[in-house]
Amino acid sequence: MIYVLHDLIIDTEARTVSHDNIALKLPDLSFDLLVSLVEMAPEPLDNGQISKRAWRLEQVSDQTISQRVTLLRKALEDDPKNPTYIRTIRGKGYAIVGSVECVEDKDLHQTRRSAGKCNLAAAALGLTVLAGTGAFFWPALGFVEEQEAIAEHAISKTNFEILIERADAQLSLHQSRETDRGIAMLREALVEEPHNFDARLMLSFALSTKATKFDGDEPEEEEAEAIARRLISEQPDNSNAWSALGYSLGAQGRMNESLPAYQRAYQLNPSNTSALSSAAHIYLLQGNLQQALMLEMRAKQAGGSSRYAEIQIFQILELIEHPATDRWREKALSLNPEQVVVLREIARSYLRKGNPMAAIETLNQAKGEDRLAPQILRLRGRANMSLGRISEARQILEGAGWRGQYNLAALDARSGDNEFADTFFKAEKLAAIESDPDPEPRIQLAEIKSAQGDKDQAIELVTRAVSLGWRDVDWLKQSPFLGELMSSDKGRIIEQRIERELEAQRILIAGTDGLAEFLGTD
């Protein structure tokens, strides 16, 4: 069905919305909300009805629905105080402004009048009704031809092709709910064509994205790796398959294995610059900041683009206190506003500077379901701890899944309850952490040990993290659990060691041809 709402054309089959012949990019939930309102026009929908029609759930919180309406209005550039498309009716919910016209068939020349709430009128001929006047105006001939071409093309597509396109559109939004929907669409498509190489490749990347950005579970991480390995066995020289393997290994914390996979991806295809940026992230975690910047520069010079290149460069520059730090932070925010990874790193920056209120304000920029992403909740919990809001911090951290468990254990230990904290130091748990080259888990264990009063063990864990590449001394000094420890003699020794490592990186970066120009220009 095609609906016409003022200057919007809403195609429920293709799941597209266009405004003045320009396609609008709407997340699945926003699209479903718009269609739900349009289908019931002119009647309003209350929150209970919206929950069932758009979310397909019995109950969704009023706040979540309100946030989604705000997102939809923003995408449509609809002023809630003077609405063109969606109005709020106090005590009744939301309703469409004006009349809705509909077309039942894709062929605009062979439509028939629709029964029920939706009136066909002039939309069947590509006409637009001026609301409240009964008058019509003819669109440009090119518009009608364009709609016919779109309709003909849509009809010629297979269900598999439609599912792949929709999945790609959902995944490109890099939002939690949309990522889940993209994965579901890919699985449905693969039922029809189980051996399709590109669809399986997309699924591997999507599963790894869910794991790294939105805390997917272990079976999904392992599935992403298994898919990538099968693809490589089929096409050993496929650069993208090697990138998928590197991504899946990194999602599992196996950085030492993922780095060679990314290097192989780039070796096979030097235009695969996303592999360079991904390898740069591993070097960043390992404390090899100069090498990370070199790879980011090489990727940019090759004309490549990575969604998180700018925020990674910002992280590095902040650690070495580079004068271009603010510039790269602003670039990251302008290129990827409201993205979880970008907001997370900006919030971390404020926390390491001792400004938890600014961190909370940054985290509040996350939209919809992303506000409940575990990475966001963990940092919001830490910010509340820094502000002394312990009960609120606990409540937030409990919703952060495993990412909040370390901090909850440290809070328990600080209050004298070591039962939960001790579970992190069982042999099996420690063995898993010891095999993980990521230094951050050692910092989290050090916070627990410090909260338990075991300062020597905490120092040992922090020292091990530094050996693995941890370079963020300000995070340690602002930690609710390690701050006092870092002001001790042993803590100052660690600080001095990190500073020596950073100074070595500053010297390397300053002496690298082209880096100064790259970092100082847009």
Image: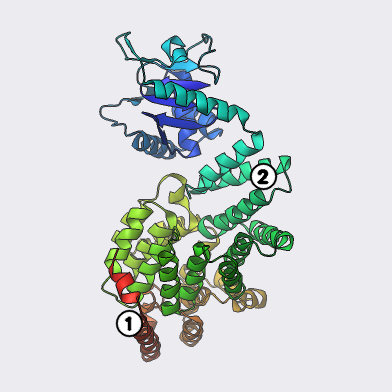
What residue is shown with label 1?
510
Indicate the amino acid at tag 2. Answer: Arg
Cα–Cα span, label 2 and label 1:
48 Å
Tag shown at residue 187 = 2
Residue 381 rendering spot, x and y as whole percentages = 41, 60
Residue 462, position in %: x, y? 47, 82
255 or 324, which is in the foreground? 324
Of labels 2 and 1, earlier in sequence is: 2
In the displayed structure, 402 sits above or below 426; it is: above
How far across and how far down the image is residue 98, in percent? 35, 17
Height in image: 169 above or below 348?
Answer: above
Is residue 382 at least partly visible in the picture?
no
Q: Are marks 2 and 1 in contact (CB under 8 Å)?
A: no
Q: Quadrant of residue 262?
A: bottom right
Say which of marks 2 and 1 sits in front.
1
Label 1 crowd (10 A; few <14 / some 14-19 / many >=20): few
Q: Is residue 312 above or below residue 135?
A: below
Residue located 57% across and 46% down the image: 180
Quadrant, the C terminus: bottom left
What is the secondary structure assignment of the residue under circle 1? Answer: helix
Please tell me the numbered disc located at residue 421: none
Q: For the image shown, how many numbered marks are present on the structure?
A: 2
Please tell me whether mark 2 sits on a helix, a strand or a loop: helix
Question: How many C-alpha atoms fall within 10 Å of the one at disc 2: few (<14), some, or many (≥20)?
Answer: some
Nearest the camera: 374 or 79?
79
Residue 152 visible in the snapshot: yes
Whole-percent x and y of residue 234?
Answer: 73, 59
Q: Amino acid at mark 1?
A: Ala
Q: Name the residue located 51 percent from the left edge and 66 percent from the top edge.
A: 278
